Image (cartoon, rainbow, N blue to C red):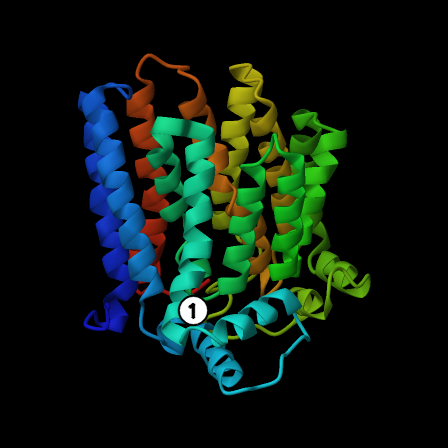
Amino acid sequence: MFDFVPLKNYFEIYLNISFFLVLFTLFHSYILRIDNRKNIAYINFTGYMFLTFTVLYMGFRPVSGRYFGDMATYNAHYINYAQGGELDLSKDAFFDYFMKFCSYFIDAKSFFMLCALLYILPLYRVSKVFFKEYWFYAFLMFTTSFSFWSYGTNGIRNGIATSLFLLAISFYDKKIWMILFFILSSQVHQTLMLPIVAFILTYFHSKSKNYILFWILTIPLSIALGGFWENLFASLGFGDDRLSGYLVGEGVEGTTFSSTGFRYDFLAYSATAVFIGWYFIFKKKFDDKIYIHIYNTYLICNAFWILVIRANFSNRFAYLSWFLMGLVIIYPFLKKEFFSNNHLLVGKVLTVYFLFTYLMEIIYYSKSYNV
């Protein structure tokens, strides 16, 4: 469908459309109250148009390993299955069963569209469930996040798994469904065991203050002990062999951050969500059980990433907290009107959050790369 779009500009076009959408949303926040009927009409019309565009644009992208990372590998595996190839159960078996099953009925292009639906629709549902008529703001936070595009086009399994994790949270009051989707997310990509275990842990201990202190402590521990943590977790057999490879394996261009070492820039990026959560929970006394649970999960997962921040594949661990980041930041603004100019603040938060993505991808890197 979008084969006419030059591949080198494919992601850039998505970013620029998002840029104008974010600016237009900011403009609305200046002139209308959030509950104004004109603003609600704008949310519904623009939201569903952008939802449809994002699914179609990502789902019908051309196959390319150069511009979409592992997409070419997925495509080769899928064609092999369609031609009668044997199942590869060496990694995430459930996803390969899913590919094999789909190969009986649909071609590779349709399969990637299905993957886009599985990646994006859960983001819509969690936004709708938590924020009702204001769902568009949360959905826009998800879809303009720094790693959103990469994990929809490159790390496809990981992206779908994190979306299934969010889908599980949207069933917070229906524990059986939540557990089922947690299990499913871990079977799509085993690295999701980290946020799942973190989420379970916060059931038994919910004091955010202790998790914040733990998060702060990991910074000097990571700086002082260097690569000790990567080797420790790898030697303990943390997760599967591939997970250990992420910790101590050699990086391949296009699959890792553009530079390794202690990334103070990404630490500062991660810290914004830590600060927002601290501010609302402790300064504004925001006592929302679901939010505190999500926030504590973010702190645990991000703290783990800080410990292994020097690993060549630390981007994989960063995403295990970053996929929650937009939700952590926007949740309090949409749940309660803390400020007289709350709608304007929502618009500004959206804009600043997106600008990090835009500046990093368009200016800092000068070309899009897949994280």
Q: Nearer the viewer, residue 97 or 205?
A: 97
Q: Quadrant of residue 67?
A: bottom left
Residue projecting furthest to the front:
105
- Which residue corresponds to mark 1? 111
Q: Nearer the viewer, residue 217 or 130?
A: 130
Q: Quadrant of residue 128?
A: top left
Q: Residue at x 43, y 78 (%)?
A: 72
Q: Residue at x 29, y 60 (%)?
A: 57
Q: Quadrant of residue 339?
A: top left
Q: Is residue 284 above or below residue 198?
A: above
Q: What element does badge 1 sit on?
A: helix
Residue projecting furthest to the right:
236
Q: Residue at x 35, y 29 (%)?
A: 134
The picture places residue 244, in percent across and down from the top left corner, at 71, 66
Q: Quadrant of the N terminus?
A: bottom left
Residue projecting furthest to the top:
340
The picture places residue 268, in percent across and down from the top left corner, at 49, 42
Visible residue check, residue 223? no
Q: Nearer the viewer, residue 118 or 302?
A: 118
The picture places residue 191, in percent across and down from the top left corner, at 65, 57
Q: What number of labels is visible?
A: 1
Q: Dot 1: few (<14), some (14–19), or many (≥20) neighbours within 10 Å?
A: some
Q: Is residue 292 left or right of residue 61?
A: right
Q: Nearer the viewer, residue 81 or 325?
A: 81
Q: Amino acid at mark 1?
A: Phe
Q: Is residue 347 above or below residue 61?
A: above
Visible residue check, residue 250? yes
